[in-house]
Image (tube, helix red, strand yellow):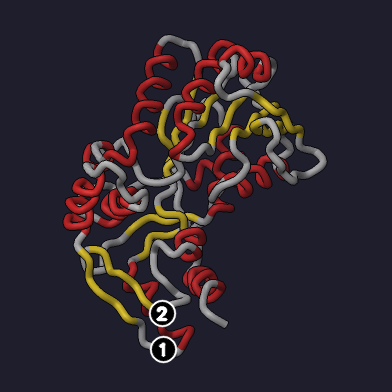
Amino acid sequence: MVEIKKVVLVGAGGAVGPAILAELVSAGFSVTVFTRAGSKTSLPSSVKIAEVDFDSESALTSALKGQDAVVSTLGAMAMAAQTNVINAAIAAGVKRFIPSEFGSDTTNPKARALPVYRDKVAAEDFLAKKASEGAITYTLVFNGALFDWGMMIPFILNLGGKSAELYDGGDRPFSTSKTTTVGKAIAGILSHYEETKNRPVYIQDAIVTQNKLVALGEKLTGSKFDTKIVKTAELESAAYVELGKESPDPNLWFSFIKRAVWAEGYGGDFKKTDNALLGLKSMSESEIEGLVASFCPK
């Protein structure tokens, strides 16, 4: 029986990095965080910090010797570095690699074809090939739209501005998870080695609709929200036009993500989950309302 004890977290920042780090530490794993040289990061005293050269596979291989698993939360601009980490993990004999996913189901053919997921799909295919050769194992984590993060930035709706763009009408059910739930899922995956080996894992706190969340926002604020219907097909078309420009607006990628989350047939509402395996509970109606309330203007 394979036991995972030592875990490297590549990227302790961003939307999910802090939550994953906190849950790994809480679950008792020995955690090392890889950072770039000169990076200033405040971490718990129990966490080891290793400054690494992400451009050097040999340096990464040395740093990964003796580690059992790697969790990557690297952002879109650092996917080249993730490729180096995967190669180094294989060379170092790491048992499990969890690549940077944490969103839409990229095994869905329609979502998979969107350019925003190109690098993630390439990493999935590479890991699957190496796993078939017995070089490493992997797990893909699909959690749908991030619930708390999606309220904060705002992506799902704008509670502060009491407004929302309702994608394809706002009645499309979609899976959503809190960042803390993603962290708990990672700890659970590493504690269920065989059951999560070489496959996607699906998690969710809830399946909701934008219109349901707008109704909650209106109830909690006592104000009518300003809403407009936006067609995700039009967002996608405009994003492709923008992508063809010499200096495209980087926000175009959000349009593709909205297509994956809310368009029909893109797998935004998970039909099955691994919540039970990982010990994750769905949010109650009162908990959903409480989360929405936490982002409403005071």
Q: How much space separates mark 1 and mark 2, taking CA atoms?
A: 8 Å
- Give the amino acid type for the residue marked by disc 2 in the picture: Lys
Residue 171 vs residue 232, the one in the foreground: 232
Q: Earlier in the sequence, mark 1 or mark 2?
A: 2
| Vertical position of residue 250 compared to residue 8: above or below | below
- The picture places residue 224, in percent across and down from the top left corner, at 36, 87
- The count of marks equals 2
Determine whether the residue tagged by mark 1 lies in a helix, strand or loop. loop
- The picture places residue 206, in percent across and down from the top left corner, at 43, 59
Residue drawn where x is 62% and y is 23% of the image? 53
> Does 97 sit left or right of 111 as displayed?
right
Q: Residues within 10 Å of mark 1 (few under 14, many from 20)?
A: few
Q: Is any atom of residue 129 visible in this view?
A: yes
| Vertical position of residue 15 compared to residue 75: above or below | below
| Vertical position of residue 287 compared to residue 68: above or below | below
Residue drawn where x is 34% and y is 58% of the image? 174
User: Pointer 1: what residue?
Assistant: 223
Q: Residues within 10 Å of mark 2 (few under 14, many from 20)?
A: some
- Give the amino acid type for the residue marked by disc 1 in the picture: Ser
- The picture places residue 274, in percent across and down from the top left corner, at 45, 43
| Vertical position of residue 172 compared to residue 41: above or below | below
Residue 61 vs residue 105, the one in the foreground: 61
Image quarter where the C terminus lies is bottom right
Q: Is any atom of residue 269 visible in this view?
A: no
Image quarter where the N terminus lies is top right
